[in-house]
């Protein structure tokens, strides 16, 4: 997993891609063929977007040339294809503020404090940013970022702490297993004694419980207690009644939902939370700002991965003219171009 790194100076690049799903990954390849550098931002802690997060094992049958693949297999193939162009990923962070610089480039900052400056920004965010479902308790926001977390950015923040993890999926179980050796105490809270996580993870968790190396509570969080932004304990509601649980670090994994997020404030033409684009290059009403994949709309739009690949290819042609205005764009085929073969490492 990638931990966000706050930069002291803006990252200068050709293209910033918001979204590391299939369309964002294929953009790296198409841009790389043209000699353009890409940095990718994603709110998730891994690449692959919906394919990797929502259906890594689900079969996909309509990718050209691949009669069958899973969401994770498609992600892995796209990463292999993009590898020669060394994409830089900035995970666990959301694109937030966007502004135009005096020289015409964009300045984009993220929730982790990373700042980019680039002539081209591409929104490839699927149906929007994945954001965590928050704990539905009054006052929970007071603890967010200090005692209450929806993702792990630094494992060291949990060392020697009384950690409670809430949830029953892969993320919850993975972090229980990863953080248990560091924590002063580890407790997993889930509403039922059945888990959606990988059987191996569930088995390892139950072994730790039987060894009394951690605790499993079947119930729900009913109350948060602490002073200021420092959590000190939880009230847990179980079938046997309420219990008090010491806790100074709470990780909640209640699943994800999709929102357009700060992108909605960027002055784009929106139609039902989709970004309207023209179909020559999938540029928005803001020059140098593009949208591809499920997040864009235009007459005849089909929400298919293959459509997003087509949009990425045409978008990169226009992006080149913005990033390299003094250079003539020469169209080349990967089957016959020696220059492209060198870029791909197959010469």
Image (spheres, rainbow, N blue to C red):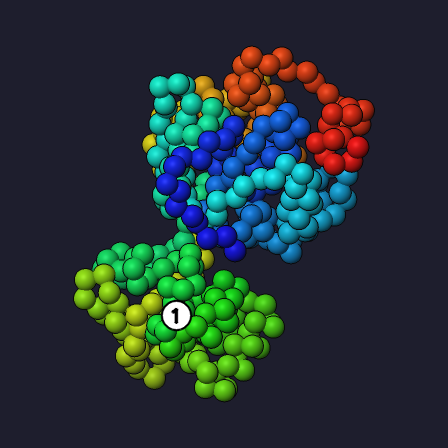
Q: Identify the image quadrant of the C terminus.
A: top right
Foreground of the two, 91 or 256: 91
Position of residue 230 relative to residue 71, above or below, is: below
Crowding at dot 1, Cα within 10 Å, few <14 / some 14-19 / many 20+, comes out as some
Look at 64% across and 15% down and name the residue there: 329
Look at 50% across and 31% down and name the residue there: 13
Image coords of residue 176 (percent x, y): 47, 70
Image coords of residue 3 (percent x, y): 46, 53
Label total for image: 1
Look at 70% across and 31% down and name the residue there: 343
Res 15 visible: yes
- Secondary structure of the residue carrying tag 1 is loop
Look at 64% across and 34% down and name the residue there: 29
Position of residue 4 relative to residue 253, above or below, is: above
Res 189 visible: no
Q: Quadrant of residue 156?
A: bottom left
Foreground of the two, 156 or 53: 156
Left/right of residue 234 with respect to residue 340 in the rendered view: left
Image coords of residue 150 (percent x, y): 39, 58
Left/right of residue 20 with respect to residue 30 in the rendered view: left
Position of residue 151 relative to residue 336, above or below, is: below
Image coords of residue 282 (percent x, y): 54, 23
Return the residue at label 1: 159
Q: Residue furthest front?
A: 8
Q: Residue furthest left?
A: 227
């Amino acid at each position: 997993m990638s931990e966000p790194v706050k930069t002291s100076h803006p990252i200068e690049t050709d293209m910033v891609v918001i979204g590391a799903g299939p369309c964002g990954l294929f953009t790296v390849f198409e841009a790389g063929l043209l000699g353009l550098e890409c940095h990718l931002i994603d709110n998730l802690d891994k690449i692959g977007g919906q394919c990797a997060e929502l259906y890594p094992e689900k079969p996909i049958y309509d990718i050209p040339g691949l009669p069958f693949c899973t969401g994770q297999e498609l992600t892995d193939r796209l990463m292999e294809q993009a590898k020669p162009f060394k994409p830089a990923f900035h995970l666990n962070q959301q694109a937030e503020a966007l502004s135009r610089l005096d020289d015409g480039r964009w300045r984009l900052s993220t929730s982790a404090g990373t700042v980019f400056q680039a002539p081209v920004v591409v929104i490839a965010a699927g149906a929007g940013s994945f954001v965590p479902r928050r704990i539905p308790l009054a006052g929970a926001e007071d603890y967010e970022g200090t005692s209450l977390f929806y993702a792990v950015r630094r494992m060291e923040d949990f060392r020697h702490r009384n950690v409670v993890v809430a949830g029953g999926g892969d993320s919850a179980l993975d972090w229980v297993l990863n953080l248990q050796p560091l924590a002063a105490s580890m407790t997993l809270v889930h509403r039922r004694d059945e888990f959606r996580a990988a059987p191996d993870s569930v088995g390892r968790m139950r072994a730790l419980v039987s060894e009394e190396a951690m605790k499993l509570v079947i119930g729900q969080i009913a109350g948060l207690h602490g002073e200021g932004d420092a959590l000190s304990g939880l009230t847990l509601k179980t079938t046997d009644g309420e219990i008090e649980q010491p806790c100074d670090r709470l990780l909640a994994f209640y699943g994800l939902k999709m929102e357009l997020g700060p992108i909605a404030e960027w002055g784009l033409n929106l139609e039902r939370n989709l970004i309207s684009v023209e179909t020559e290059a999938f540029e928005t009403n803001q020059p140098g700002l593009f949208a591809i994949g499920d997040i864009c709309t235009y007459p005849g739009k089909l929400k298919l991965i293959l459509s997003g690949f087509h949009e990425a290819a045409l978008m990169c042609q226009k992006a080149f003219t913005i990033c390299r205005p003094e250079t003539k764009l020469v169209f080349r085929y990967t089957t016959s171009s020696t220059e492209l073969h060198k870029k791909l490492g197959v010469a």
